[in-house]
Amino acid sequence: MNTAWIYLILAGICEIGWAFGLKYSEGFTKLGVSIVTVVVMILSFVLLAQAMKHLPLGTAYAIWTGIGAAGTAILGIVFLNEPRDAIRIFCILLIIVGVIGLKVFSGAK
């Protein structure tokens, strides 16, 4: 795995972080959490931009959002007691399979 893919995975992890930050900033009314959230947002975009230097736009963006969407949904289930019904889990798995498929069939090295 080359550096672009590492940047992309880290960007996706940062997306999960800022999504949680948005929840806990309570509409940007909590200053400390809001600052951390904005910093993680910026870091996520910077890492995505670095990854896009070497990866196709559609692949990079879809994987970035997929990591963020699936990761945030999973952590919401685990830590925020969000619904964990079978269809929701199945849909999250579809996102994960799509992300893996994009990586495997991207043609980028």
Image (cartoon, grey):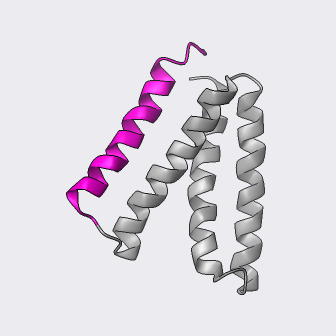
Q: Main secondary structure of the magenta part?
A: helix
Q: Closest to the observer: 32 or 24?
A: 24
Stretch of the chain drawn in magenta: 84-109
Residue 69's x, y, as percent?
50, 52
Residue 8, quarter of picture: top right
- Whether the magenta-drawn stretch holds residue 96 is answered as yes
Q: Which residue is outermost to the bottom?
A: 29
- Name the residue: 57% across, 51% down: 13
- Asked if residue 30 is positioned above or below residue 59 in the image, the reply reads below
Position of 38 compared to 21: left or right? right
Q: Is residue 98 magenta?
A: yes
Provide residue 73's location: percent of width, then percent of height. 43, 59
Please determine whether, in this image, residue 24 is positioned above or below residue 94.
below
Residue at 62%, 23% in the rendered image: 2
Quarter holding the C terminus?
top right
Q: Residue at x 51, y 45 (%)?
A: 67
**Residue 39: % across, % down:** 77, 63
| Number of marks | 0
Q: Is residue 26 left or right of residue 85?
A: right
The answer to which quarter of the image holds residue 42 is bottom right
Residue 84 x/y as whole percent? 27, 64
Q: Is residue 86 above or below residue 20?
A: above
